[in-house]
Amino acid sequence: MHPLLEKAQQIKLKLNWSLIFGVSFFLVVVIGLVQITTGVSDWLVENKDAQIKHLIVQGHPKYTDETAIIKAIKKADLSSFFELDVKHVQQLVQDLPWVATVSVRKQWPDTIQVYVVEHEAVAHWNSDLLLNQSGQAFQASSDKLHDLPQLYGPEGSEEEAWVAFKQFDEMLKVNNLTLSSLALSERFSWQLWLDNGIRLDLGRKDKAKRVQRFIDVYPRMEQRADAQVDTIDLRYDTGLAVSFKPLQEEQLQNKSKA
């Protein structure tokens, strides 16, 4: 046989073996995938009715009773581990009054874990709501809360009011004064109340500067022996107006002793 024909025959044989090997490998992979898919499908069918039997509540909530959390979770369909709507469970728990955020995770074969983070109340808002550290309003029972500041303002101004309160409170605290309440009017005019009963009218602009102006002159106002500061109007570019109220007999005695 001619050497060229012999070489061509050898190449042909190699090509055929490569093709056979490739096809065989492909068929093995396909058969394997079919078997795996069939096995998984059969397993899912066998376990489709696996129910949730255990609920684990984590996060140590302070105001939300664990019984209330479990009761909320049980409003969801817990009959199937695979079909359980985790987002629905999360929303049911987050609808509870004190709950800020919720994380829900399934744990095979029959458990769900719920991690709860509550709001931290820092102030009352418009008498019937509470504010958290982010200045977000939420509704919850405040019977267990005492000595929280009172903040008032139009809907949507919660965060602005809380940020302003913290700023003013820090300024006053450095000067041994305590801010107890703040109000923001519909026209965005600011008023502050101190724990000693004094009201500060700040107006709508230069709020921090006007608070500082009050701090600078207040020590001289306390020198009056027969009256107590009632209201200080700081809605001027310079200066201020002071209203006094007469001292009660007990206050007069205490002031004379001091």
Image (tube, helix red, strand yellow):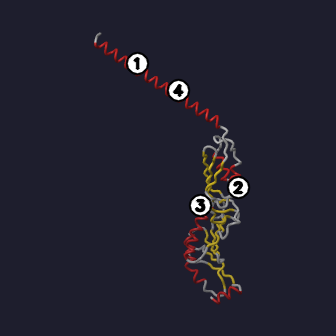
Query: How dense is the environment of label 3, judged by Cα within 10 Å: few (below 14), some, or many (20 and up)?
Result: some
Residue at 28%, 13% in the rendered image: 3
Question: Closer to the N terminus: mark 3 or mark 1?
Answer: 1
* Residue sitting at x 65%, y 37%: 48
Which residue is label 2 attached to? 68
Q: CA distance from mark 3 to mark 1?
A: 72 Å
Q: Are circles 3 and 1 on residues that touch, CB within 8 Å?
A: no
- The percent position of residue 147, horizontal first and vertical second, equals 66, 71
Which residue type carries mark 2? Ala
Distance between the Cα atoms at labels 3 and 4?
Answer: 57 Å
The local secondary structure at tag 1 comes to helix
Q: Is residue 248 left or right of residue 102?
A: right
Q: Residue furthest top?
A: 1
Q: Earlier in the sequence, mark 2 or mark 1?
A: 1
Disc 4 crowd rating (10 Å Cα; few below 14, some 14-19, many 20+) is: few
| 243 is higher (above) or lower (below) than 152 | below
Marks 2, 4: nearer the viewer = 4
Q: What residue is shown with label 1?
A: 16
The spot of residue 124 in percent (x, y) is: 66, 65
Name the residue located 49 percent from the left edge and 28 percent from the top edge.
29
For the residues labelled 2 and 1, the Cα–Cα distance comes to: 71 Å
Residue 164 in picture, x, y percent from top left: 58, 67
* Viewer can see residue 3: yes
Binning the other alpha carbons within 10 Å of mark 1 as few (below 14), some (14 to 19) or many (20 upward) gives few
Q: How far across and down, in percent of the image, does residue 75 sit?
A: 71, 48
